C-alpha cells in the first residue's frame, strides 16, 4: 500500500489555480503561509473498502431502544417498529455493515430469548450497561429487518464469553439454512422463510476483558472451536467471494500484553488447518485518554481540544504496530485488521444514567471522525473494515434522539461527506502539514487524503485542526486535469459547538465551489474544519 506521510517542501509539479475560498471566520484571520499539497492520481493505491465506514449498534442505553426500535404501536412513525426518521438518515450514509448485538452485551446475549412472539419473549437483564431490563423485543428478526431497511450488511457477534459453540452454531443454522431443518422451520414460522445473508461474524468481543477475561492462549482455543462450528448454510454464500467472513478478537492497545495477543492469534492462523479460519483480526481503540472517561463532550477548553485530537492520532501508531506483527505471519495481507470499535469516549452527560454512555458530539468529533477515516484509508491494504462506536445515542454517535425528535451530529455530517470515498481508490497526497501548537501539544495543522471513484472523479478531503487560524492550501494535481472543484465544508462557531434539539443546524455542512484559474488551485480552509471536494474536468 502507498502510505504517504505529510512531507516538508512538496514541489508543485502542475499548477491549477482555483479562486481562493475564504470560509467561515477565515476572513478575519491574519494571512498565513500556504501549505503546498500534491495530489498524484497517476499512482493509485489500495481500495478504500466501504466497510471502513461500518457502524456499531449495541444494546446499550438508548442505542437500540428509542434510537432504532420504538415498536409498531409507537406514535413515532415507524416501519415494523423501526423508526423511519433514523432509517432515512442512515440510508444517506450508505452504511456498509452494522455490528450487533455488542460489545460486552454480545458475550451475555442468548439469541433464543430474542425470537418468537414478542409478548412471550423473556425480560432479562443488561448487567454491563446500567443493569436495566432487556425486553428482548429487538432480536434477530428485528435486527435483520433494520439492516435490510437501511440497505446494509449484518455483522453479528456470537457469544464466546458465556455461550457455547453449539449455541452459536444453532444461531447460524437458524439464520442461514435453506434446508427444512427444525431450526429453519422455526425461522419460517417466525416470519422469514428465506435464509438470511450474514456477511460478517465476530468470534466474541473483548474476550480479554468483559468477554470472559481470557488469556490469549485460552481465547485462541475457544476461537478455533467457534470458528469450526459456526457455519453459514445460505446457498448464496457458498460461492467464492460471497462467503461469510469471520473476525477474531484482537488487541486493545499496543503494550507487551497486546503484542503477545496479536502474535498468538496470527501465529496460529499461519499454521491453521482446513477446519478453522479467520478473515479478520479486530482492534479496539477509543479516544479517551484514560478510563473512567472524564473529559467533557461539550463545554471544554482549547487544552482539551488539543489533547483529544492528539490522542486520536495515536490510532496510526497502533495500526502500524499490529500491522507489522501481522505482516510477519501474513505478508500477503489476507487477514484484515478490523477496527471494529473506535471513537471518542467522554464523561457521561450530567443527569444521564452513567451506564448509558450518553455524550454530546461537537465539531471536535467531526475532526476526530475525519482524522481516523484518513488513517484507515492510508492503511487501506490492511485495514479493510472499521466500526465507529456507536451508531445512535451512545458514545460518538451519528444521531441523537429525544423521544420523537432526532438530530444529526457533526460526526454524521463527516460520514455523509465521505460517502464518495467508499470503495474508491486511494490516491497519494504529499504535503507539508504545518503545525498547530497549544501548550505542550504540537499537532499537524492540516490532514489530507484523496481518492478516485469508479467514475474517475478525484475526491480530496482536507482537515484544518487549528482552531483559530485558517489554512491556505495550494494544490498541485498530477494525473488529473481539473477546471473546478466543489463540495462541502463543515465548521462551527466554537471548538465545542454542538447540535441540539433546539438548534439542530449549528454544525452543518455548507457548499463550497471554485473555478480553476491560471493553472493553480488555492483554497482557504476555515479553522477547525473538514472539507471534501470533487475535482471536475
Ligand atoms: O462501546 C462500548 C463498550 O466498549 C463495548 O461494549 C465494549 O466492547 C468496549 O469495551
Image: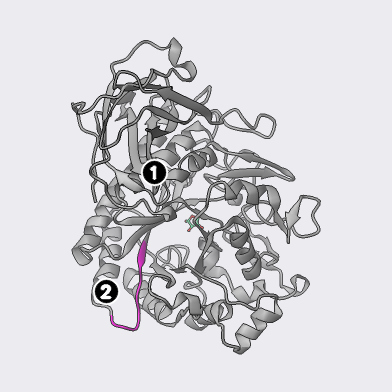
Asked if residue 332 lies left or right of residue 491, the reply is: left
Tell me the residue at 54%/41% (across/down): 412
Residue interval drawn in magenta: 273-281
Report which quarter residue 272 is drawn in. Answer: bottom left
- The image shows residue 270, relative to residue 367, as above or below, that is below
- The relative height of residue 522 versus residue 93 in the rendered view (above or below) is above
Q: Is residue 158 left or right of residue 228?
A: right
Q: Write the residue at 49% across / 80% down.
A: 235
User: Residue 433's quadrant in the figure?
Assistant: top left
| Depth order, front residue of 255/531 | 531
User: Do residues under tags 2 and 1 come within 8 Å of each other at their CB atoms?
Assistant: no
Tell me if mark 1 has few (under 14), some (14-19) or many (20+) residues whose alpha carbon lies within 10 angstroms of its own.
Answer: many
What is the number of the mark on residue 268? 2
Residue at 57%, 43% in the rendered image: 348
Q: Is residue 253 above or below residue 346?
A: below
212 with respect to 403 (left or right): left
- Residue 188 in the magenta stretch? The answer is no
Percent position (x, y) of residue 101? Answer: 56, 63
SS at mark 1 in the image = helix
Residue 297 spot, x, y in % from top left: 53, 36
Viewer-side residue, 243 vs 139: 243
Q: Examine the image and state in which quarter residue 407 appears.
A: top right
Amino acid at each position: 500500500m502507498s502510505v504517504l506521510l505529510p512531507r516538508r517542501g512538496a514541489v508543485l509539479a502542475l499548477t491549477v489555480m482555483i479562486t481562493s475560498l475564504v470560509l467561515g471566520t477565515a476572513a478575519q484571520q491574519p494571512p498565513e503561509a500556504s501549505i503546498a499539497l500534491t495530489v498524484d492520481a497517476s499512482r493509485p493505491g489500495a481500495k478504500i473498502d466501504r466497510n471502513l465506514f461500518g457502524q456499531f449498534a449495541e444494546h446499550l442505553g438508548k442505542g437500540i431502544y428509542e434510537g432504532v426500535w420504538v415498536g409498531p404501536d409507537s406514535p413515532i412513525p415507524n416501519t415494523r417498529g423501526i423508526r423511519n426518521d433514523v432509517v432515512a438518515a442512515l440510508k444517506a450514509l450508505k452504511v456498509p455493515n452494522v455490528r450487533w448485538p455488542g460489545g460486552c452485551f454480545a458475550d451475555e446475549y442468548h439469541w433464543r430469548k430474542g425470537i418468537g412472539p414478542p409478548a412471550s419473549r423473556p425480560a432479562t437483564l443488561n448487567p454491563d450497561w446500567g443493569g436495566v431490563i432487556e425486553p428482548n423485543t429487538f432480536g434477530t428478526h428485528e435486527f435483520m429487518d433494520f439492516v435490510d431497511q437501511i440497505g446494509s450488511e449484518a455483522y453479528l457477534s456470537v457469544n464466546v464469553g458465556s455461550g457455547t459453540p453449539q449455541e452459536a452454531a444453532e444461531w447460524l443454522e437458524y439464520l442461514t439454512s435453506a434446508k427444512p431443518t427444525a431450526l429453519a422451520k422455526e425461522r419460517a414460522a417466525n416470519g422469514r422463510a428465506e435464509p438470511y445473508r450474514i456477511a460478517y461474524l465476530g468470534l466474541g468481543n473483548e474476550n480479554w476483558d468483559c468477554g470472559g477475561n481470557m488469556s490469549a492462549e485460552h481465547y485462541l482455543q475457544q476461537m478455533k472451536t467457534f470458528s469450526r462450528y459456526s457455519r453459514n448454510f445460505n446457498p448464496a454464500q457458498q460461492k467464492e467471494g460471497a462467503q461469510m467472513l469471520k473476525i477474531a478478537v484482537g488487541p486493545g492497545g499496543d503494550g507487551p500484553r497486546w503484542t503477545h495477543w496479536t502474535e498468538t492469534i496470527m501465529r496460529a492462523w499461519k499454521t491453521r488447518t482446513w477446519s478453522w479460519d479467520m478473515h479478520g483480526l479486530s482492534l479496539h481503540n477509543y479516544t479517551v485518554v484514560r478510563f473512567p472517561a472524564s473529559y467533557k463532550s461539550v463545554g471544554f477548553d482549547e487544552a482539551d481540544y488539543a489533547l483529544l485530537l492528539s490522542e486520536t492520532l495515536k490510532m496510526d501508531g497502533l495500526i502500524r504496530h499490529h500491522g507489522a506483527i501481522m505482516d510477519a505471519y501474513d505478508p500477503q495481507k489476507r487477514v484484515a485488521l478490523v477496527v471494529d470499535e473506535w471513537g471518542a469516549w467522554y464523561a457521561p452527560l450530567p443527569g444521564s444514567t452513567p451506564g448509558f454512555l450518553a455524550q454530546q458530539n461537537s465539531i471536535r468529533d467531526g475532526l476526530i471522525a475525519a482524522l481516523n477515516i484518513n488513517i484507515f484509508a492510508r492503511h487501506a491494504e490492511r485495514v479493510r473494515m472499521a466500526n465507529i462506536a456507536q451508531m445512535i445515542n451512545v458514545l460518538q454517535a451519528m444521531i441523537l434522539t429525544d423521544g420523537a425528535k432526532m438530530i444529526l451530529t457533526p460526526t454524521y455530517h463527516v460520514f455523509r461527506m465521505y460517502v464518495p470515498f467508499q470503495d474508491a481508490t486511494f490516491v497519494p497526497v504529499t504535503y507539508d502539514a504545518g503545525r498547530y501548537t497549544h501548550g505542550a501539544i504540537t499537532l499537524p495543522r492540516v490532514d489530507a487524503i484523496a481518492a478516485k471513484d469508479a467514475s474517475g472523479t478525484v475526491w480530496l478531503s482536507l482537515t484544518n485542526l487549528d482552531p483559530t487560524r485558517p489554512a491556505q492550501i495550494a494544490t498541485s494535481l498530477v494525473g488529473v486535469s481539473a477546471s473546478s472543484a466543489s463540495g462541502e465544508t463543515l465548521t462551527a462557531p466554537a471548538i465545542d459547538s454542538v447540535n441540539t434539539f433546539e438548534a439542530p443546524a449549528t454544525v452543518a455542512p455548507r457548499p463550497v465551489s471554485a473555478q480553476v484559474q491560471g493553472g493553480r488551485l488555492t483554497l482557504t480552509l476555515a479553522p477547525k474544519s473538514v472539507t471534501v471536494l470533487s475535482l471536475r474536468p
